[in-house]
Image: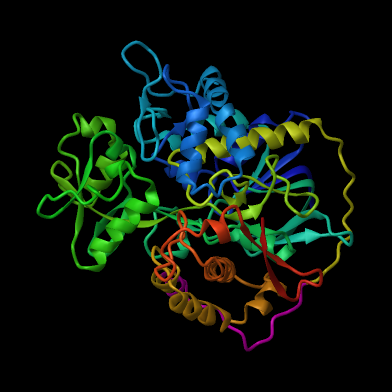
């Protein structure tokens, strides 16, 4: 048994920002199922959106975030984050995090899709995430104990319903219980549920499944963002091509050089991500390849070294055009929280992509993800630093039971393939019902109540992918409209009268035996 003041599950930007900013007298533990920097934050090519330009203002950033989010956003959350963004950039700069600058020494501000101003701050060109992670990891070093290669498979809930810890299994097969005053989920999203994705291999929806198993409220799971441009070769995606490429002049074209976004949206190639992704998807379904023409971008290799290296590794002649396809990129939904990170379970918090604060609405605005992680890590650290310490016991209600011998888990490749086909970029009632029946054939209720401690890492991953896939599919079936990252071919328009501002909340009942879904306004 290991005890701490703060237990952080996950190791991305939100987790390290929290760890860095907690008081030195706090005993902090970070648990990650892989290595500290093996996640989406380290892969992030895009930058951080902040209204710091001479002609920019947080109100404009606020308006762009609402527009991209299909006006499904929580306005208070959007206002708070966009107002704080310039301060977060200033704080990082003062701490020594290096951002790209112009010839006069000022911050170099880029343009990305659905933004009305140049406001994207980058570090190392297309390596912003890696640079921030290196800075935060260095600043947090010595302030926390890190358990790598440890898979958290259960949250510990006491008899009063409070979360007091978690159970983890390490690579040697040993199980350990961790107890803490504050248990924080910072596990990221669930991009690996899909066969085409920009996400790291570790991002499989674990934290969301953990929270749902424990009885927490989950919100907005139907809203999955598919990034328009992933490198696409021989029917497979091989990595992200940042939206900043289109911001610098890259254009989406057919093999004949015809632009595909003209007349589709006033912002053309820089339209909101769901519109660009759906347009590319339509061409690909008809057998027409789509390319990103980067010939107009000067010094492409210097501006985008990560993308250049990826193309050269895959023997792609990037100087002319790059074959692209959309893939899952970001989850707007997640564990429902407030702007501090508090969930519906006392003692349990969620920050970063695992959380749903309402900031992103139905579709995240480009470069608001690293921003959200920095914001939430800071706000939760302030709350924990100022709050009283609750004494945590080790008595808890054991509600898990052994699995019966007859139930099984789906193969990971089958989950990814069927989710892409039925709960992917374009959805329909027929496909969603088919997917839901298939997922439920694996007896999800049994997995929700089961003790998973005897499973190996791959089997735990399968179980969590099954649960999170079900949450997305169930929620997508219930929202009978198209909005942001959720597109229904049988309900292709927004239905503001029925759905504007309404969230689909998924929560298990008090006995943790039945699945309840509510639509909240």
> Which residue is the extreme one toward the top?
104
Q: Picture coordinates of residue 35 (x, y %)?
A: 53, 48
Question: Is there any visible trace of residue 227 in the rendered image?
Answer: no
Q: Is residue 372 above or below residue 488?
A: above
Q: Residue at x 47, y 50 (%)?
A: 363
Q: 472 or 41: nearer the eye?
A: 472
Q: In this rendering, would 65 be left or right of 21?
A: left
Q: Picture coordinates of residue 364 (x, y %)?
A: 48, 46
> Which residue is the extreme one toward the left?
256
Q: Which residues are magenta?
A: 400-416
Q: Is residue 24 above or below residue 76?
A: above
Q: Residue 190 lies in magenta, yes or no?
A: no
Q: Residue at x 39, y 68 (%)?
A: 489
Q: Residue at x 63, y 89 (%)?
A: 406
Q: In this rendering, would 113 be left or right of 381?
A: left
Q: In this rendering, would 241 be left or right of 51?
A: left
Q: 235 or 84: nearer the eye?
A: 84
Q: Picture coordinates of residue 157 (x, y %)?
A: 81, 60
Q: Residue at x 58, y 67 (%)?
A: 471
């Amino acid at each position: 048994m290991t005890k701490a003041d703060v237990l952080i599950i996950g190791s991305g930007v939100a987790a390290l920002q929290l760890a860095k900013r907690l008081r030195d007298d706090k005993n902090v533990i970070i648990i990650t199922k892989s290595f500290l920097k093996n996640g989406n934050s380290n892969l992030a090519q895009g930058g951080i959106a902040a209204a710091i330009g001479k002609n920019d203002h947080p109100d404009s950033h606020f308006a762009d975030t609402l527009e991209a989010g299909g006006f499904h956003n929580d306005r208070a959350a959007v206002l708070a984050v966009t107002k704080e963004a310039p301060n977060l950039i200033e704080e990082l700069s003062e701490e020594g995090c290096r951002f790209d600058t112009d010839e006069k020494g000022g911050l170099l501000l880029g343009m990305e899709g659905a933004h009305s101003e140049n406001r994207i701050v980058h570090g190392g060109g297309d390596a912003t995430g890696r640079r921030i992670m290196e800075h935060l990891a260095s600043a947090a070093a010595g302030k926390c104990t890190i358990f790598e290669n440890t898979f958290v498979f259960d949250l510990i809930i006491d008899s009063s319903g409070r979360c007091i810890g978690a159970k983890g299994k390490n690579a040697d097969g040993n199980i350990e219980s961790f107890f803490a005053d504050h248990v924080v989920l910072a596990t990221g999203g669930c991009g690996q549920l899909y066969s085409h994705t920009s996400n790291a291999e570790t991002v499989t929806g674990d934290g969301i499944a953990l929270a749902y198993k424990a009885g927490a409220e989950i919100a907005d799971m139907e809203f999955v963002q598919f990034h328009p441009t992933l490198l696409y070769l021989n029917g497979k995606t091989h990595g992200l091509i940042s939206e900043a490429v289109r911001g610098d002049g890259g254009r989406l074209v057919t093999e004949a050089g015809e632009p595909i976004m003209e007349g589709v949206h006033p912002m053309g190639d820089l339209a909101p991500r769901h519109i660009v992704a759906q347009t590319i998807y339509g061409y690909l379904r008809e057998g027409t390849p789509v390319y990103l023409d980067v010939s107009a971008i000067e010094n492409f290799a210097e501006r985008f070294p990560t993308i250049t290296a990826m193309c050269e590794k895959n023997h792609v002649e990037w100087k002319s055009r790059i074959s692209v396809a959309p893939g899952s990129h970001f989850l707007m939904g997640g564990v429902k929280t407030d702007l501090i990170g508090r969930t519906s379970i006392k003692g349990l918090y969620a920050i970063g992509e695992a959380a749903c604060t309402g900031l992103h609405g139905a579709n995240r605005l480009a470069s608001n993800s690293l921003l959200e992680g920095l914001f939430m890590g800071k706000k939760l650290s302030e709350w924990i630093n100022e709050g009283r310490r609750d004494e945590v016991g080790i008595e808890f209600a054991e509600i898990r039971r052994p699995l019966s011998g007859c139930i099984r888990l789906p193969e990971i490749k089958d989950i990814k393939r069927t989710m892409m086909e039925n709960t992917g970029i374009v959805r329909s009632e027929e496909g969603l019902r088919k997917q839901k029946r298939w997922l439920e054939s694996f007896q999800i209720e049994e997995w929700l109540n089961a003790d998973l401690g005897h499973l190996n890492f791959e089997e735990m991953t399968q179980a969590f992918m099954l649960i999170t896939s079900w949450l997305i599919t169930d929620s997508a079936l219930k929202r009978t409209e198209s909005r942001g990252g959720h597109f229904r071919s049988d309900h292709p328009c927004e239905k503001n009268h029925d759905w504007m501002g309404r969230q689909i909340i998924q929560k298990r009942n008090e006995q943790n035996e039945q699945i309840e879904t509510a639509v909240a306004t």
